Amino acid sequence: MSTIYDVKAEVAADTLLDKAGYEAMYRDSVADNEGFWKKQAAIVDWIKPFSKVKDVSFAREDLHIRWYYDGTLNACYNCVDRHLATKADDVAIIWEGDDPQRDLKITYRELHKRVCRFANVLKKLGAKKGDRITLYMPMIPEAAVAMLACARIGAVHSVVFGGFSPDALAGRIHDCESNIVITADEGLRGAKKIPLKASVDAAAAHESVTTLEKVLVVRNTGADIEWDAGRDHWLHEMEAEVDDDCPCEEMSAEDPLFILYTSGSTGKPKGVLHTTGGYLVYAALTHKYVFDYKPGDVYWCTADVGWVTGHSYIVYGPLANGAITLMFEGVPNYPSASRFWEVCDKHQVNICYTAPTAIRALMREGDAPVKKTSRASLRLLGSVGEPINPEAWEWYYHVVGDERCPIVDTWWQTETGGILISPLPGATALKPGSATRPLFGIQPAIVDSEGVELEGAAEGNLVISDSWPGQMRTVYGDHQRFVDTYFATFPGRYFTGDGARRDKDGDYWITGRVDDVLNVSGHRMGTAEVESALVAHPQVAEAAVVGYPHDIKGQGIYAYVTLMDGVASSDDLRSELVKWVRKEIGPIAAPDLIQWAPSLPKTRSGKIMRRILRKVAEDEFGNLGDTSTLADPGVVQDLIDNRMNRS
Ligand code: WT7
């Protein structure tokens, strides 16, 4: 049994939760779910108040999820305009550049002006309510401004992580039929330049991209870029021609706010669709409670806005709460391994929310780079993206937090819109490696492979039994895929794709994905996607991809590749395949290890036996389980003899 830490946090005056307070509020939230969410919806300002709270069915034949559906509001108004009366001159965004010499503070008044001008530029480019606008941006304030400007005019943003390849970007533009792309000349990360505009040009040249009309470009590094005079527009030139005033579009609670593509176990990435009212209520409420946010706190989430963490916990949640949100352009180890903690000291950060992969990478550099900084401003630490191993948790707690700061290990997904399982600081006893308890209104359950709910201490598949306002509403353009992916495996419940254990105290421990989805440095990657990238190479006949434990990334990508007849394997071909996958998807999908496999282990019906491939990749082939259904048992010995990951 691991240590339990009971860390007393200063508790915010308006949340006032201790252990008993959490338990009572949780009980009420489940006993009267509609009543609870009706009351909590007051965290946002409504234009037309709702009278209907919840209309949900998880039944496969009649799947629908609606919250607050006769109310109207505007998300941008809630994140910006409504704060002008009381905190116009307070800082909304602190921006810290990749270069430690560069930073910027933006007040709510300035944010309002920038968002209005940006929104007017979008209108001038022809943007209308309901249009899908793709953002392919570096971590600069304009990324947040662009998201809010879309929300202001009722356009639906689809942010594509700047590390994705032109092909991946093209696929996403095509899927949601985007008419406008917003980008920058270049991005900057760890002093390396990222040619964003050039990637947009390459994506736009893709034959599948037929809807794109305009590209709006932010001048960031000032690099020379190619220019298409009919299509491309500089933001700074257009901004000079528009005014500071732009009204907010009145949106129905169930109008789409954004699409965010995420990988699944099959096929191409899914466009996860979130709507306006429920999402904003959920992002704001969870930001307030989980991070115990008090006015004036400096809050820093180190994620990129290209992921859902950046949407909910850099932009929408904090800004809806009128918070000071820090946005960081750089990486944890540039110019040195002290950077994160130097940023904390420089901006007097109180709350720091980061990922286990960053913690492990910094832990490897030892305690000295941490200990040379003060970190006295820190009050609370957070973790997200993958299970945090107890060793990294302890280091974060003892070395970074000086045993003073509670750690909130927050479990959630792109699909959930916000945090579902997490300790509440001061209210929940902490166990290194456990995400602990469900938040208000969240009803997790553990079911076995037959769908039978397990009671008490148990391990199995993690499902959620009832809806919450931040839940995704559909897969953009493919509702059937939404139904089949999340509601078919365990009828009547939302299936998370994760495994979990519940201990005798009722705390949850997420054990990782139970489907063919990898978690590489906290980024989700479908094995099927990497496989189809590999087989698209002319010399590859077949490929199978699995994960294996990786010290820093959590999971590494292990690919078994069968070459076309007559093609000789070589180290050159290996590096070419890695480059190929980087080009097809992006650097995060690049295989760490490639094993040449003359053939793959298959059942007599031709199904690849991934269980065996996983065991070999984990270097645990002593225990391969039942191999009696293999069509050709001889294949396995060759895989073992030539395995790449030997401890
Ligand atoms: C998957 C979702 C949630 C925002 C970032 C990732 C894993 C996430 C935790 C955690 C254990 C976690 C799960 C989940 N995951 N947070 N605290 N403990 N696992 O969003 O890309 O949609 O990935 O990340 O496996 O299903 P995402």
Image: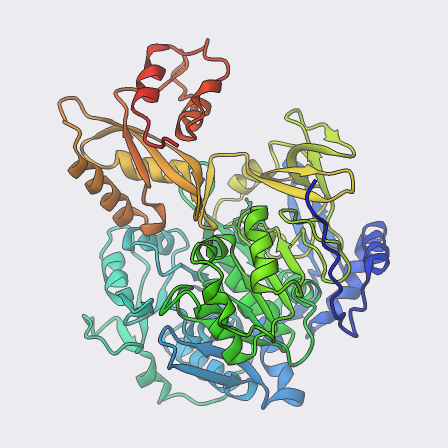
Q: Position of residue 18 (x, y in %)?
A: 82, 62
Q: Position of residue 324 (x, y in %)?
A: 58, 78
Quadrant in which the C terminus appears: top left
Q: Position of residue 314 (x, y in %)?
A: 54, 68
Q: Nearer the viewer, residue 225 or 233?
A: 225
Left or right? Give the position of 50 relative to 284.
Answer: right
Please tell me which residue is depicted at 35% across the width and 70% down the height of the picture: 335
Q: Nearer the viewer, residue 34 or 361?
A: 361
Please tell me which residue is depicted at 18% across the width and 36% down the height of the picture: 571
Q: Nearer the viewer, residue 103 or 248?
A: 103
Tell me, yes or no, if residue 473 can be seen here. no
Quadrant in which the N terminus appears: top right
Q: Nearer the viewer, residue 483 or 641?
A: 641
**In this view, 611 is above or below 40:** above
Tell me, yes or no, if residue 88 can be seen here. yes
Left or right? Give the position of 406 relative to 522.
Answer: right
**In this view, 305 is above or below 377:** above
Please tell me which residue is depicted at 35% across the width and 57% down the height of the picture: 163
Please tell me which residue is depicted at 74% across the width and 31% down the height of the picture: 453
Toward which corner of the image does residue 118 lie, by quadrant? bottom left
